[in-house]
Image (cartoon, helix red, strand yellow):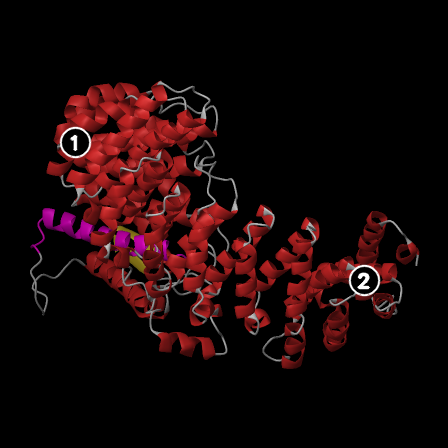
Amino acid sequence: QSTIDDTDAKPRHSKARVIAAIAKVDLEDGQWEELPGMLQQAATSQQVRHREVGIYIIFTLLEAMPDIFQENMTQMLTLFNRTVQDPESVEVRINTMLALSELAMVLDTDEDMKSLKSFQDTIPHMVKILQHCIETDDEEHAMQAFDVFNKLLSYESAFLNTHFGDLLHFFMQVSANTEVDEDVRSQALSFLMQAARYRKLKVQSLKAGEQMTTMCIQIATELEELPSEEDEVSPARSALGLLDILSESLPPSQVAVPLLKAIGPYVQNPDPSHRRAGILALGMCVEGAPDFIATQLKEILPLVLHLLEDQNSGVRSAALNGVARLADDLAEDMSKEHARLIPALIKNFDLALQAMRSAQPSSKEYELNSHILKASCMAVDSLIEGFDQEDASKYVNELVPRFAMLVEHQDHRVQMAAVSAIGSIAAGAEEAFKPYFEKSMQTLGKFISIKDDEDELELRSIAIDALGKVAGAVGAEAFQQFVQPLMHSSEEGLHLDNQRLKETSYILWSTLARVYEENFDAFLPGVVKALLDCLEQEETDSEVQLGAEASDLVGQEVTIAGKKIKVAGAGGVVEGAEGGDEEEDDLVQELMEGDEDDDDWDDLGAVTGVAMEKEIAVEVLGDVLTHTKSKYLPYMQKTVEVVLPLLDHSYEGVRKSAVGTMWRAYACLWGLAEDGGMQKWQPGLPLKVKPSADLEKLGDLVMKGSLALWEEEMDRYLT
């Protein structure tokens, strides 16, 4: 009673939390049975303060024990349908929303259709609450309302399905409204991002992609000329992020096609902010629809080249960003235009360098031109990946000296871009890079031991990666004196608590194993241990199984390299992989009409950092064993034991790398057997060459594991 009568909100909330904590204990012990009735009475009181306290305590109780009102679901939803429309108190309305988001966790959408319908009836009222908070600049309550919608989006799709189209329309209106607070608009865009990612079939069936795409381009015109920090949230940056997700989640007909139609007027607009928005929007759609964008390059490239010549430096900077994004996914296609692209990139580089020399270091002009230097390096870095050696060699003398000037730049982001580009040029040009080898080693070598802060660790990672590429370019003999310090740096990097540096170390080992082959054996003990330790890391839901096709292999002993190994069992479940022809409207409709909606697609879940690290580690293991050959035999037993169960890892990237590594292990052992006198393999059936018993057993193991994948995978690149 004292809580209900308290006039100060903060003490009321504190007391409510105490009541909830006590109630959690008492109700579980069968005591304080009159409390729910008291709370319902308070929540429907004629006094506003009583209603506020009653609903808040109900919310805190649901938060602590969601199933507390499960037996009274109908009664609670009747109450919430009333309090969500409270005419006097936004506190009552918002706390009702919060309570509903907790109650949803225990509502059975399959069995209790009446309660589901009652819950769905509250959604329009929730929208009105959020709209009111936005119109009255009530940011605190608006953010709470956004949290509720985001929660519901992550729950069963049935909660929002009935009103999903209206919700998308409302959040698009908020996102596009420049009179609304930027944080609120960014929250609305965040909801649309999650909707496109986790309810993509629903979004597709509503054909909302085109409207969202054109909205995003318009919002992108608000982007400031000077690029902001990577982690700074704004409506314009969020809109570009939404475009990225849309292009990945929806078919080109709903995103890439309308975007290409829409950007024409933008890139020809006299306002530079529109020209920037056009090319930036295009760049964001490449990764999600590379095949379609590749078919449109003949129309896109003249537009890009035109913007690289723009009088406005901000537009040129955006065009450089566009080149980098296009080349990231279409390097070979873009490389065909190297004769026009590289001179344009060099021209932008030179203009920016010249402008910086006459500008004050703290001025906007200096910062913008500094960004152009970085963007030029990044564009070359991406483009050069698609060049053949002959074409890459043509530009070494023009590019390397220019980028070398930036290695000591005061902005570490410019430094990293330059260092990375030098590494890529070396990898592409190979022999033609040798005149710059010694100088590059002196310049880049000093970065492999820096570790004072995160910026230095990031630069160190880029430098190690670049030096690995240099090693591949100049060959084993020339690089010999640098191997030991580089390996020492990479091994130290595993213990510096930096994910990127750790993964860079793995990739370096792959490169050096390729360069030195069996002469890499001195480093194998540390390398293999680190990679296997990585693969044996614990991660949530990471236990795996071989699948039905290979279940009979679990527990069997197999002899490899003269040693017996036991195949580990597993308990994970393949979640499925994205795929299928999303462009077929009838398929979409069929899926949308099913009881499960798109939940099966949406349950794929986020990929953990550990899973991505394992993907790289298992791929590197395959590289190392392939190139070190007989020197790897002492480690083959443990490798097979650890890698084989990963064929059924929940993340498709790990599965793909694992199946590749297992076949490479088989090929490695076969090659060694041939070197040892076994007759070389000959095509045709029946088998003309019978492998040894251990090879045959390993082959059976790998084949059955692969067939299990083949049956379940939808990713054609994996199978």
Taking the magenta stretch, the answer to whether it contains residue 672 is: yes
Residue 427 % position (x, y): 20, 35
Which residue is identified by label 2?
88
> In the visual, does 259 lie left or right of 11?
left
Q: Which residue is mark 1?
A: 395
- In this rendered view, identify the residue nearer to me: 561 or 148: 148
Does the magenta run of residues contain 205?
Answer: no
Quarter of the rendering occupied by the C terminus: bottom left
Q: Is residue 535 visible?
A: no
First in sequence: mark 2 vs mark 1: 2
C-alpha distance separating marks 2 and 1: 71 Å
Q: Which residues are magenta?
A: 651-680
Q: Residue at x 64, y 59 (%)?
A: 148
Helix, strand or loop for disc 1: loop
In this picture, residue 92 sits left or right of residue 349: right
Q: Is residue 303 visible?
A: yes
Query: Does residue 395 lie above or below 301 as drawn?
Result: above
**Quadrant location of the N terminus in the rendered image:** bottom right
